[in-house]
């Protein structure tokens, strides 16, 4: 149990402790850490954007190839006299269990 008296705290530093001073080098280090962190985030965002651009180009290429294949198929079917342009649309067949 305590006597009720406030405990005195030593405001001066002992010989083992060094006084804490915020110097210009500490603030420069904090600034460098912040810049480094921001730089890493920017690099990650850039990598993500590059992946998206690559995917976009791949999809555009696939779309162009499909369009070209459809055009080739249409020309081929027209050249052999297939009546694909006047054919009726296929009816949907419902399988058992579907509604």
Image (spheres, grey):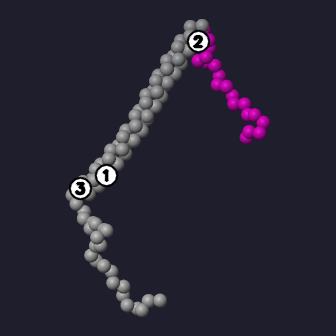
Tag 1 or tag 3, which sits nearer the N-term? Answer: 3
* Residue 7 percent location from the top left of the image: 36, 85
In the picture provided, is 94 more to the left or to the right than 56?
right
Category of crowding for the residue at label 2, using alpha-carbon neighbours closer than 10 angstroms: few (below 14), some (14–19), many (at least 20): some
Quadrant in the rendering for residue 48: top left
Mark in the foreground, 2 or 1: 1
**Quarter that holds the C terminus:** top right
* Residue 67 percent location from the top left of the image: 50, 21
Tag 1 or tag 2, which sits nearer the N-term? Answer: 1
Boundaries of the magenta span: 81-99
Category of crowding for the residue at label 3, using alpha-carbon neighbours closer than 10 angstroms: few (below 14), some (14–19), many (at least 20): few
Work out whether residue 47 can be spotted.
yes
Residue to which mark 3 is pinned: 25
Q: Mainly helix, strand or loop, the magenta region?
A: loop
Residue to which mark 1 is pinned: 34
User: Which residue is drawn at the image coordinates 53% and 12% (left, top)?
Assistant: 75
- Distance of label 2 from label 1 (alpha carbons): 64 Å
The answer to whether the residue labelled 3 contacts the one labelled 1, judged by CB atoms less than 8 Å apart, is: no
User: Which residue is drawn at the image coordinates 44% and 89% (left, top)?
Assistant: 2
User: Which residue is drawn at the image coordinates 64% and 25% (left, top)?
Assistant: 89
Q: Nearer the viewer, residue 59 or 88?
A: 59
Image vertical order of residue 30 relative to residue 88, above or below: below
- Distance of label 2 from label 3 (alpha carbons): 77 Å
* Residue 96 percent location from the top left of the image: 78, 36
Q: Residue furthest right?
A: 96
* Residue 33 percent location from the top left of the image: 31, 51
Image vertical order of residue 75 relative to residue 97, above or below: above
Mark in the foreground, 3 or 1: 3
Residue to which mark 2 is pinned: 77
Secondary structure category for the residue under label 2:
helix
């Amino acid at each position: 149990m305590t006597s009720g008296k406030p405990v005195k705290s030593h405001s001066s530093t002992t010989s083992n402790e060094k006084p804490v001073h915020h110097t210009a080098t500490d603030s420069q280090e904090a600034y460098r850490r912040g810049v480094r962190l921001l730089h890493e985030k920017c690099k990650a965002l850039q990598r993500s954007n590059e992946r998206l651009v690559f995917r976009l180009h791949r999809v555009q290429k696939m779309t162009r190839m499909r369009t070209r294949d459809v055009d080739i198929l249409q020309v081929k079917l027209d050249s052999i006299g297939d009546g694909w342009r006047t054919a009726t649309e296929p009816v949907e067949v419902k399988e058992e269990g579907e509604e």
